Amino acid sequence: MSSYFITGVARGLGFEFVRQLSTNPANTIIGLVRDKTATEKKVSEELSGRKNVHLIQGDMVDYASLKKAVDEIATITGGKLDYVIANAAFLSVWAAFEPFSLLAKEPEKLEKELVDMFTVNVVGNIHLFNLITPLVLKGNGKKIIAISSGLGDQEMAINYELFQNAPYSISKTALDMAVAKFHAEYRKDDVLFMCISPGMVDTGYIDPETALLNDMIGKFMKYAPDFNGPTPIDVAIQRILSVMDKSSVEAGDGGKSLSQFGNKQWL
Ligand SMILES: NC(=O)c1ccc[n+]([C@@H]2O[C@H](COP(=O)([O-])OP(=O)(O)OC[C@H]3O[C@@H](n4cnc5c(N)ncnc54)[C@H](OP(=O)(O)O)[C@@H]3O)[C@@H](O)[C@H]2O)c1
């Protein structure tokens, strides 16, 4: 019997984590959402009868709500937690395709985008890890996984002229470093902090018809000639859970940022 806390479970990868992990009735699944009522409805419609799914309201930009969420988790689990999957993130469409030189035409919007990315994807997770690690130290799983992105990999940006998604990519590189720092602190306690990226997954947030996507996909295909489009969401989550399952502090995975394949092959 394992307990999992997953952020951003209202849709996308987060909801699929809940769907797959809750198939085992012995698991306790706790999800953080911004709109609890709407997600309760979705869970009752799509995962009806799963009594092991609990939803908690919280926002990654609201420290008080994260603190309250951690108190609620402790009440549900009896003061301990096995696994954390820090999945929630701000993904932008506005800055997804254009290079800095074009984003620069709206400097205030660009600045807000950079700050919002950092606030949600980096600061929010740092607060969450600080608040939740005491529960994980008392649990059995002792794994805190942040969902990152290959777009945060500097080599890929450099070698494939991948200027797309700049603010988001910067936030994921920073998240990778934050996780490395948490590992550096908690390695002695055998808590595995690591980042796992899902690859490109179709969650419906980008219109596949948009011409702007083609340039990025072209670069992806140069990077990975076998790449033939987004991974189905169920497969992506199976791969992440497999990497999470196999990884350990003892095996030297702590602080690393790995792909869905358990290596640095991002696509
Ligand atoms: N999809 C991909 O191809 C891909 C590729 C690489 C990495 N990733 C990573 O995978 C993870 C999931 O991505 P996804 O594609 O499933 O994204 P998504 O469909 O946009 O879902 C993001 C989730 O995060 C939540 N969220 C956003 N801001 C939040 C905040 N301030 N507080 C609390 N929750 C917040 C959203 O909540 P609401 O529903 O309330 O908006 C939503 O449930 C992210 O970390 C993303 O960076 C995805």
Image (cartoon, grey):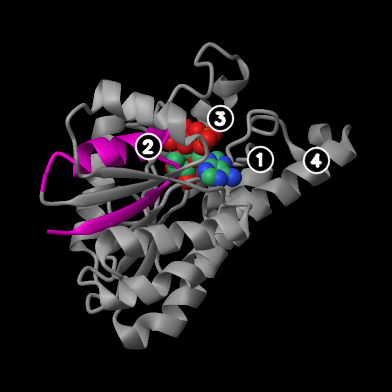
Percent x, y of residue 36: 45, 36
**C-beta proximity under 8 Å, tags 3 and 4:** no
Query: Which quadrant: the N terminus?
Result: bottom left
Which mark is nearer the camera, 2 or 3? 2
Residue name at image x 14 percent, y 39 percent? 23
**Circle 3 residue:** 216
Side of 30 relative to 146 (left or right) = left
- The residue to which callout 1 is attached is 163
User: Where residue 232 sits: x, y (%)?
Assistant: 30, 27
Between the C-alphas of marks 1 and 3, the distance is 9 Å
- Say which element carries label 3: helix
Q: CA distance from mark 2 to mark 3?
A: 21 Å
Q: CA distance from mark 1 to mark 4?
A: 14 Å
1 or 2: tag closer to the N-terminus: 2
Q: Residue at x 32, y 31 (%)?
A: 226
1 vs 2, front mark: 2
Of tags 2 and 4, the one toward the viewer is 2
Circle 2 residue: 13
Is residue 98 shown above or below 262?
above
Query: Looking at the image, which is closer to me, 17 or 71?
Result: 71
Alpha carbon separation for disc pair 1 and 2: 24 Å
**Closer-to-camera residue (79/168):** 79
What is the three-letter code of the residue carrying label 4? Leu
Q: Is residue 259 above or below residue 51?
A: below
Give residue 124's mark: none
Magenta residues (range): 1-25
Q: Amino acid at mark 1?
A: Phe
Circle 4 residue: 110
Q: Residue furthest bottom?
A: 188
